[in-house]
């Protein structure tokens, strides 16, 4: 039976995901028409639980559900949207793009036998008599007309053109991005010890994140910007806001990009669509494995969490440095620095189980590298109004006593290490 090669289909799909998703998942049309913006989830409903990735959708076809997490490419997206297997998705895309399927070994053998027989027949037949072509191999009908008919829809064609123009703009922007990131961080931001960071202090105080900031400042991961520009999804500047700026660094300490938390003058989150935003990643850089380094590891023990607030809450309560990865996807790729033998994962407790699953994924990967890992999940229940609970919620509602203390954690780790678990 004929089949499609995954690499061949992926190559053909690159740049055509707008048409593919429109044709194979019409219930995602609203997300296509508002590319990059939150819309009603095509699986769960609601108002704003889903969006497609705007910056690279043409190439990847990915999107993210607030409940289920990211779908990194069009294959994962269609599998999720349509409840398809990978094989079903591969066949649907291959057929839609009119890709010639590959013959199975049985079909190749049969075709070879027919060819040999035709050659023999031709050798013994009368001059001028040509053998009839074989019709044994099943080839799926071409779907070019379907693909072309989809392309003729005005809004799809316009969207494709806009995305291609945006891709060119992004390339030009990316070429200058590394310098822009360095300039914001080194020239425009203030250290957290400055007298002009009151909105930042108020924001952290509102979350019970009050401790010796000198230790955090030594790691040079948090700074304050008095008036950082906020841009909407169309690239228009909405305004300038006081902001917490966090350095995201790779395993070697190289600055990759910045994470920003936009605030009001009184330390509340700014009234903008996404008060927490990561800057784009410069070309040839990778945020995989990177993190916001809140403090320096001591005694070979390091904590890791998703959000900055969660990491600081765990740091304050345990007195063990905790690095932040910004989100669950990057938590899974976290890379521990040299000298760390034990990692404590301060996991988010999500109704969707996203935080717990990401923590389990990271644990399994780090343990393969010989690192001892412990996952800590809040015992605090999730209320009907909440999507989840993190350790900063625990700190705010129950205080430090709801956390395992530093001495308890170190003793526990020491006993486990002595028992041969490393």
Image (cartoon, rainbow, N blue to C red):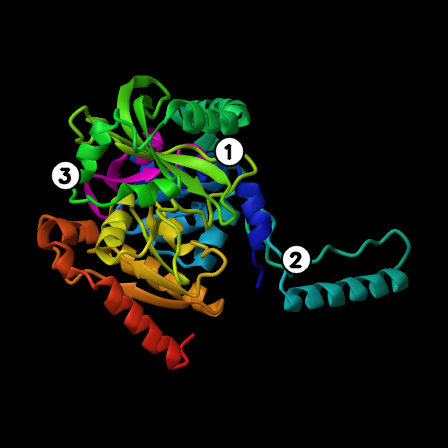
- State the CA–CA distance, disc 2 to disc 1: 52 Å
Is the N terminus in the top left, top right, bottom left or bottom right quadrant?
bottom right
The residue that label 1 is drawn on is 282
Q: Quadrant of residue 121?
A: bottom right
Residue drawn at point x = 65 percent, y = 69 percent: 106
Left or right: where does residue 277 sit relative to residue 157? Answer: left
Residue 223 image offset from top left, x and y in percent? 34, 33
**SS at mark 2?**
loop
Magenta part of the chain: 31-57
Residue 254 image offset from top left, x and y in percent? 51, 41
- State the CA–CA distance, disc 2 to disc 3: 74 Å
Residue drawn at point x = 43 percent, y = 54 percent: 333
Residue drawn at point x = 55 percent, y = 26 percent: 175
The residue that label 3 is drawn on is 206
Q: Quadrant of residue 359?
A: bottom left
The residue that label 2 is drawn on is 135
Verify CB contact (< 8 Å) between mark 3 and mark 1: no
Residue drawn at point x = 41 percent, y = 80 percent: 420
Verify CB contact (< 8 Å) between mark 2 and mark 1: no
Q: Earlier in the sequence, mark 3 or mark 1?
A: 3
Kindly report which numbered mark, 3 or 1, lies closer to the viewer in this rendering. 3
Is the C terminus in the top left, top right, bottom left or bottom right quadrant?
bottom left
């Amino acid at each position: 039976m004929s089949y499609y090669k995954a690499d061949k289909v992926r190559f053909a799909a690159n740049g055509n995901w707008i048409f593919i998703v429109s044709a194979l998942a019409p219930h995602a049309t609203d997300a296509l028409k508002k590319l990059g913006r939150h819309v009603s989830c095509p699986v769960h409903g609601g108002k704003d639980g889903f969006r497609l990735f705007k910056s690279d959708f043409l190439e990847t076809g990915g999107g993210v559900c607030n409940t289920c997490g990211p779908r990194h490419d069009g294959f994962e997206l269609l599998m999720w949207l349509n409840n398809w297997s990978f094989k079903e998705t591969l066949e649907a895309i291959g057929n839609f793009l009119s890709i010639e399927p590959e013959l199975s070994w049985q079909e190749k053998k049969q075709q070879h036998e027919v060819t040999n027989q035709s050659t023999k027949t031709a050798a013994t037949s009368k001059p001028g008599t040509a053998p009839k072509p074989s019709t044994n191999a099943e080839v799926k009908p071409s779907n070019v007309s379907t693909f072309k008919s989809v392309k003729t829809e005005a809004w799809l064609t316009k969207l494709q053109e806009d995305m291609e123009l945006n891709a060119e703009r992004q390339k030009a922007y990316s070429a200058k991005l590394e310098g822009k990131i360095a300039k914001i961080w080194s020239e425009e931001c203030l250290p957290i010890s400055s007298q002009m960071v009151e909105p930042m202090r108020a924001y952290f105080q509102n979350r019970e994140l009050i401790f010796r900031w000198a230790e955090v400042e030594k790691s040079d991961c948090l700074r304050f910007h008095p008036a950082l520009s906020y841009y909407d999804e169309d690239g228009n500047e909405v305004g300038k806001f006081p902001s917490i700026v966090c350095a995201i660094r790779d395993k070697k300490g190289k600055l990759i990009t910045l994470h920003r938390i936009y605030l009001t003058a009184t330390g509340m989150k700014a009234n903008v669509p996404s008060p927490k935003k990561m800057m784009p990643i410069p070309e040839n850089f990778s945020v995989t494995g990177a993190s916001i380094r809140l403090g320096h590891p001591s005694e070979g023990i390091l904590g890791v969490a998703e959000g900055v607030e969660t990491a600081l809450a765990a740091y304050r309560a345990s007195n063990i440095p905790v690095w932040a990865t910004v989100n669950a996807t990057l938590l899974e790729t976290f890379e521990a620095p040299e000298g760390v033998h034990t990692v404590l994962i301060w996991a988010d407790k999500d109704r969707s189980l996203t935080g717990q699953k990401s923590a389990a994924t990271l644990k399994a990967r780090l343990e393969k590298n010989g690192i001892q890992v412990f996952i800590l999940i809040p015992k605090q229940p999730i209320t009907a109004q909440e999507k989840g609970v993190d350790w900063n919620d625990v700190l705010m509602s129950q205080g430090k006593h709801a956390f395992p203390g530093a001495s308890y954690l170190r003793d526990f780790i020491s006993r486990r290490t002595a028992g041969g678990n490393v």
